[in-house]
Image (tube, grey):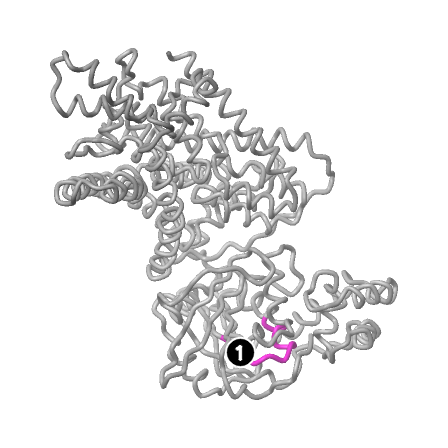
Amino acid sequence: MNMTPSHIAPKKISNVVLAGNPNAGKTSLFNHFTGLQQKVGNYPGVTIDRKVGKCDLGDGIKISVTDLPGTYSFYPNSIDERIALQTLLNSSENDKPDVVIYVADVTQLERHLLLFSQIADLNVPLIFAVNMLDIAESEGITCNLEWLEKELSVPVVGVNGRTGEGINTIKEILKARTFKSADKPFMEVPQIAQEAISVVKKTMAEEIEDYPALLVAHHYSWLPGISEEEKIKLAQALQKPLFNSIRAQVEETMQRYNRIVAVIEKVLKKKKEEKLTFTDKLDKILTHPILGIGVFLMILFLLFQAIFAWASYPMDLIDAGFAKLVSVLKNNLPNHLLTNLLTEGIIAGLGGIIIFVPQITILFCLVAVLEDVGYMSRAVFLSDNVMRRFGLNGRSIVSLISGVACAIPAIMATRTISNWKERMITIFVTPLMSCSARIPVFTVLIAFIVPEETVAGIFNLQGIAMTGLYLLGGFSALISAWVMKHILKQKESSIFMMELPTYKMPHWKNIFYTVLSKVKVFVFEAGKVIIIISVVLWFLASYGPGNGMEEAQEITNTELLNKNLGEEERQNIVAAQQLEASYAGKLGKAIEPVIQPLGFDWKIGIALITSFAAREVFVGTMATIYSVGESDEPEPLIQKLKGMKNPITGDAVYNVATSLSLLFFYLFAMQCMSTIAVVYRETKGWKWPLIQLIYMTGLAYVVSLITYQLLS
């Protein structure tokens, strides 16, 4: 916890961190600094996303830039908000920042100066970046940056997160090392809790300054770098009435705001005439308790319409392209084991995921736009009253909406929920939201049930069906939450607070980097799993126990000898019988009695097993299974699945009853090992993930059973 006084810049810069309130524009600056040289990892010891990138200052000087999670003060209410304090108060020389670039929204300057003043009192080198000056000007607000620099006694730079204005100025300050710590404390720290500060200084093994000592008095129970022996001593020494943490927090905040208000009066000028801003006018509609919800539902509807309408053409091209690639390779490569592995295993499985990149890209892009313009905060605000009726709160909607992309970060996002009961309910029901990994499955199955037609010339019927599935998933999540509300016992309720940012044009550069990183994760992370499973499946589908496959070939050829069949048709029948005799066929046959009442055959059973690694693997599995032994002119996957016939009845395998049953199974089933793993990590035990797995699997089975039995 040693905070060394540093009024001058360090001789060498290696670590720079961006800090600030949520919605201040840190991510925009981070993208301008790092461009494509960024990656997402985890902070040491926790699973919270850590965005780190490299920045070239010129003259051979390169630095590491870290984007800290947004936080309002050094008195955090969530795990995410603790990260800022832990990072800035860390005694580790490897993680300790050389300089902090504090990003503030000038239109919210009074509120944003609170966290800055706390960081300044840690005596760390600072650069103050004033963002959104253009928006302030349109609202009649002017800020005197020279006076602000004099008041704060650290370099102040006006920046524009959209255009990158001011970035080069900050780079020059970093390169020249002209940044520094504040000349004097923002607040007289000893006045707050002199005795508590003295106790901390005597207890800690390392030397510590006044304000860090006060923070240790507040947060010693969870701060890293404090030994268990020191925690025990501090717990015994810092008893009331010696130290009242809540009272000390209130007193500190009031003292800081006394000076902040004085600074604001000097540097910020507003036009006297009060007029409604563009944000105020728009919020009259978008945050209206009735109109706002109607707009929100319409936005969701248009979102899923776009996923189908805009993605259909590139998806068709990708599907046809992979089919053509397999055909060319089969015609030009020797008939060899490795050729079959490449065409029937690797390429077939990979094609089953690449085809859905256009839909995933559109989903991530539109969600990123909604977040960047400031609308997602309104969706959270609107949903708070509704969420509370189901045992959740407004912040739960962040996880539920994030679950539309992926349940894993969505469950991690529950750390912003301070109430234990509301957090556990949110974790429990979030996987019921249909994530992007289900899109490949939904797309294929919807194509078997709903015709590709438009209503009123603009609304795609398949898009409407997709919207219905997402709404059904959301409705199921709310009903499950309501049930959990009455099962879990805790009377304590939470208070919902969230800043509503001003509306602004989206930062297209930010959106590009956001979408690119998420699509890369989808393709490469899912792709690794799919390729491995595709290779294993190819082996299981190409080989069998004993001489079973050879015998199946001989018997089938004998049975077809007197039938007037074409060579291609005969080969496909032989391949189907050999597949049934393979290891994959034996595995599918073993579970067929359990899934047959749902309308699933053994081939679908194989896909159910493999897709437990990740839902999207279902399509890759079906692509691999139906590619083994196929002719030299492969069909696109969807056409191939549409043409599959039941060998006994001659009916289509994917008829309406089976397709709808399978659709509902994937809508409700967990079917994701990674989600189970993250729930285990977040709840610190197997109780919740096992309950979740049993509940969702049981729900999926019952709904699928009822659906198939009613429709068949």
Q: Image height check: is 193 above or below 476?
A: below
Q: Which residues are magenta?
A: 116-128
Q: Image height check: is 393 above or below 191?
A: above
Q: Position of residue 357 (x, y in %)?
A: 31, 45
- Judged left or right of residue 130, residue 463 is left
Type of amino acid under label 1:
Val
Q: Please identify the quadrant where the C terminus is shown.
A: top left
Q: Which residue is mark 1?
A: 99
Q: Image height check: is 644 above or below 111?
A: above
At mark 1, the secondary structure is strand
Residue located 11% across and 14% down the image = 564
Give neighbour class at mark 1: few <14, some 14-19, many 20+ (Cα, 10 Å): many
Is 452 in the magenta?
Answer: no
Number of callouts: 1
- Judged left or right of residue 674, residue 578 is left
Q: Position of residue 176 (x, y in %)?
A: 44, 88
Residue located 48% across and 38% down the image = 672
Residue located 25% across and 31% down the image = 638
* 133 or 85, nearer to the observer: 85
